Amino acid sequence: MSPDIFIKATPIVLQGLQLTLIITICSFVLGQILALPLGLARQANSPLLRWPAATYTFLIRGSPLLVQLFIIYYGLGQIPAVRNSILWPILREPLYCGIIAIALNSAAYMAEVVAGALKRVPKGQTEACISLGISRRHRFTDVLLPQVYRELLPNIGNEIILVLKSSSLASAITIMEITGVARAFTARTFAPFEVFITAGILYLAIGFAFTFLFRLLERRYGITGTRTPAPEASA
Amino acid sequence: MKTLALSSLLACLLAGTAMADTLRVGTSADFPPWESVNEAGDVIGFDRDVIDEVCKRIEAECNVANQAFDGLLPALQVGKFDMVISGMSITEERAEQVDFSNAYAEPPYRFAVAAGSDLAKTEKREDLEAALEGKVIGVQTGSTHEAVVRAHLPKSEPRLYERNEQIADDLNAGRIDAGLLEQSVWEQLMEAREGQLSLTGPLLSSADYAEFGNGTAIAMRKGSDDLKKRVDEAVASMLADGKIAELSNKWFGYDLSYKAK
């Protein structure tokens, strides 16, 4: 334990910050985008939609993310057909592979959450919409989605923290995000304690920032379980 | 009664220390022919034979455990191991943290590229250095090779891998342009990947790049002076009587025993 290693470790660990943020935000956004159609498919009447979605979430949630990362990065890279395909410029880059793997993983978890929220919307609303003559599209975009996503804000805030922590696995496929640079620095200095404590503090700080951001969003748009009177629209 | 109990306890403790001590040895068995794991799950290889012979000569019982390379020295420092033997080169940074025995071996290093790459035909070191400018070079995290690339190829981008097979696979996939590893490791990797890789440039040693370190040695915790003295003697005798050369020929097919400069 030496204080000067802490001081030396800080700028090095910070080198990984940018990549950690890129992976976290891109994977999170991509995951959320994929989660909606998947969640809808999970709740669909047609088994042709329901079963593929259920299989997908079962496979992804049932296997470790690290394994999925290895399959996408090292596994697909072994197949000549993949290397000759138009997808190769994307799959060639470790960063894109990392973002895709973490996004696909996050989407599976989020799809289940979205499906659950869709199920909780009272049936009476659909009937009311039909009797009011609201079109299918508007029933979806103006009635269903706003409710579902406002209710899900705490879950979404939770998911971005999980994605942030998942991003630390990206170092396994040569991406030098915070954990990656910390590991490389440890391998040179043999001071794991100082370096990983510094990395841990940085993760806590990013997580805190995301939590704070979602707290604000929840206060503004969230639906609380007990219908407290909505705060005066001051903004 | 109490005295009897205490004295028998003391006797047991003393008897324990008097017996041949058991030493825990750490290695990262992913580095054939230096060390690897056979079908039965045992660690085998050049280093295994070397450490067995060392233990025989210092009259100690040794247990070899397998762990990832980048965690070996931290584990040694916190006392999980008493010795580390893992094809590890002596470097200044490592020597600040741990003590090294006398070097027992010095292997040659080499660059390799995907078969058919433009870089495959380079013969001179200087030409290769120029050709590698702006290219991505795969190395193992925390290895001396990483230090070599950073120091001598500042215009190339080192990409850090946990395992050397991953470097070979990414070379073949075209994700990286070149890789820097030990000659013997390339030979193993190429055996399993027929026609995918080709070696390039000359054989390299610490004479070319000082960052390769001063030979391969056994690492011990700082302050284990008694053990170090015994291991040093064992290594010196094994170099003198040709045991290291014999083991080297068995595993590598050539002699890489350390020659004092």
Image (cartoon, rainbow, N blue to C red):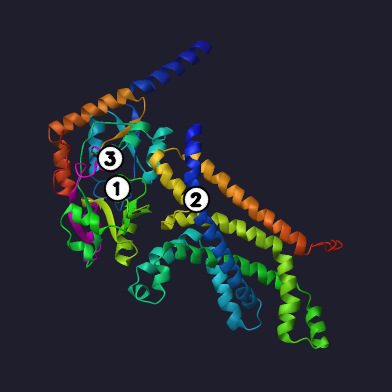
Q: Horizontal and vertical percent for residue A21?
A: 54, 57
Q: Quarter of the image holding residue B231?
A: top left
Q: Nearer the viewer, mark 1 or mark 3?
A: 1
Question: Label 3 amino acid?
Answer: Ser
The residue that mark 2 highlights is A178
A2 vs B161: above or below: above
For label 1, the residue is: B145
Which dot, 2 or 3, sits closer to the camera? 2
Residue designated by label 3: B89
Chain ID at mark 3: B
Q: Position of residue A206 (x, y in %)?
A: 60, 51
Bounds of the magenta span? B185-214
Identify the disc placed on residue A115. none
Q: Is residue B200 magenta?
A: yes
Q: Disc 2 on helix, strand or loop? A: helix
Figure quadrant of the C terminus of chain A: bottom right
Q: Tell me the kind of residue under disc 2.
A: Ile
Left or right: residue A204 versus residue A172 is right
Examine the structure image and report whether residue B82 is included in the region drawn in magenta: no
Q: Is residue A148 above or below residue B22?
A: below
Q: Residues within 10 Å of mark 3 (few under 14, many from 20)?
A: many
Per the image, label 3 sits on a secondary structure element best described as: loop
- In the foreground, B194 or B247: B194
- Inspect this view and state whether residue B58 appears: no
Taking B64 as reference, is B240 left or right? left
